Amino acid sequence: MSIAPGSIAIVGAAESTRIGSVPEMSQIMLHADAALNALADAGLKPSDIDGVACTGAMMTQQVAHYLGITPKWVDGTSVGGCSFMLHVRHAAAAIHAGYCNTVLITHGESGKSRINATPRPPEPQSLNGQFEAPFGPFGPPTLFPIPVLRYMKTYGVTHEQLAMVAVVQREWASRNPRAAQRDPITVDDVLNSRMIAYPFRLLQCCLVTDGGGALILTRADRAKDFPQRPAYILGTGESVETNMISQMEDFTSSRAFRVAGPEAFRSAGISHADVDHLMIYDAFAHLPLYGLEDLGFVGRGEAGAFIEARHTAPGGKLPMNTNGGGLSYTHTGMYGMFALQESVRQVRGTAPAQVEGVNISVCHGVGGMFSASGTIVLGRERP
Amino acid sequence: MALPAGRPRPEPTPETQHFWDGTKAGELRLQRCQACEKAYFPPRPFCPGCGAREVSVFAASGRATLHSYVIHHRKVPGFEPPYAIAVVELEEGPRMMTNIVDCPQTPEALQLDMKLEVAFTPMDDEITLPLFRPAQGTPAGERA
């Protein structure tokens, strides 16, 4: 039995009080700070929560206990930066099934200050440790862009088009006082910035920040009892492929995207023409291109020209990554929570760079390089 | 060719030991499903295509083409930047991560689809890494 579109809603949403450089908070406190802000947003107390979701080994119990919550449902799904999209999907199913009534999803990451941060070295006996680590990858900037040259050669996508992604997102960031990077940049600025891992330069790689975010979900028939306008969950999708980037099936397209995206559209009962606002997790400049194509907004190989033509820029027909994205707003390491926060703000009508008339927002996440994906469709109105 | 110290060292498991025994012996060992004939990598004692446990180990040709790569420009232990982290497509079909040796680490020299051959490179007495180099006998200008 599927969940009718709009039967579960997000009734609380907030980020940590500060994002960027937050050396006064450890990772667990970033979870808690965001959670307390989301509870205040929803007019709730910790004792009103009976379901908890967050990422990381043993983290659901740490977060629940730290906040004084006794959950009867937990989800510790940890598939990288899109884990929160999966948490939203799983929480909606759990609420629908009657396992719990009110779910708190938290994220906190001391990505920059590294206080109580999660260590992430591959174990030398893991498949990554045996068949990737010996060849010198050192974090996401050396892994995530590995497919890009193949994509560029296959479709004739240019360095300038991949630079334009960063330029457009900086335009959005310049409208957002909380964005880490707000000064306008040009394609030349991007192509002259420091080389990190060819073909990508510094301005095509995400920021590294501290921060947190939290969401509160409940049944839509209760949603009107809360102080904020609800964001209705219309549809959801998820999938995983491989956490070895060398083994992804097609270097020009993500299989996980191609499963999660269409399932979210199908379950929401929407078409592309219904989408007023789009978030595509942009850890690196190529991800919005893969997302636009794999979710079917444009044909294969067409996304570079689509962004270059300013269709996703302020004033464009498909406003995308309107907070400035992982490239210019913030990126703690797991950015998906911040993409969801922006979709909620756009649907509520409270975003700093508010797009006029947003009824439907699609929020698409990626995790663990191209290894996982989650897509959430939010609506301003209950269908 | 000696590798600088500091490179992360793989630790074989029961399912991968044959692969690392192979590189040490100068063979690039892949596996093939006896039911569906799919050749696959990384190693596991069953077919990822159809789930059959009847699989065999065979020595691959060592010939490959350059599928994609990045050139890392920051210093990390065991590597001298700039260095390419590459994915090659083996003649038999599977892809693997590797480094490209005996070749300038530049976009001009590293052309996608250029022909490569395996270059077994010892890390220590137990572990030999399968690196790749431009195929011998192919003039630089024709390697793509």
Image (cartoon, rainbow, N blue to C red):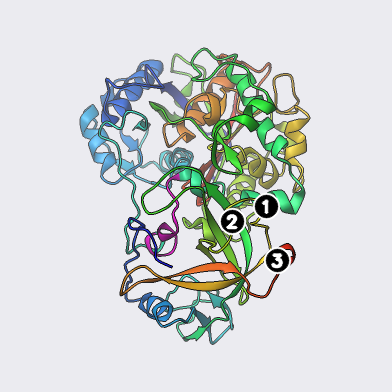
Q: Residues within 10 Å of mark 2 (few under 14, many from 20)?
A: few
Q: Is residue A313 visible?
A: yes
Q: What residue is rendered at 40% in x and 16% in y?
A: A41
Q: Position of residue B11 (x, y in %)?
A: 31, 67
Helix, strand, or loop for circle 2?
loop
Indicate the quadrant where residue A68 lies.
top left
In the rendered image, residue A52 lying in the magenta stretch gets the answer no
Q: Give above or below for A134 relative to A324.
A: below
1 and 2 marks in contact (CB < 8 Å):
yes
Quarter of the rendering occupied by the C terminus of chain A: top right
Residue at image position (33%, 71%) is: B12
Q: Which mark is residue B108?
A: 1
Q: Compute the Cα span from label 3 to label 1.
A: 11 Å
> A65 or A58: nearer the eye?
A58
Of marks 3 and 2, the one in the foreground: 2
How far apart, in angstroms, are the residues tagged by discs 1 and 2?
8 Å
The residue under label 3 is B143
Q: In the displayed structure, would residue A143 be above or below residue B87?
A: above
Bounds of the magenta segment: A129-139
Which residue is pictured at 30% across the width and 74% down the height?
Answer: B125
User: What chain letter is assigned to the residue under label 1?
Assistant: B
**Identity of the amino acid at label 1?**
Glu
Q: Quadrant of residue A22?
A: top left
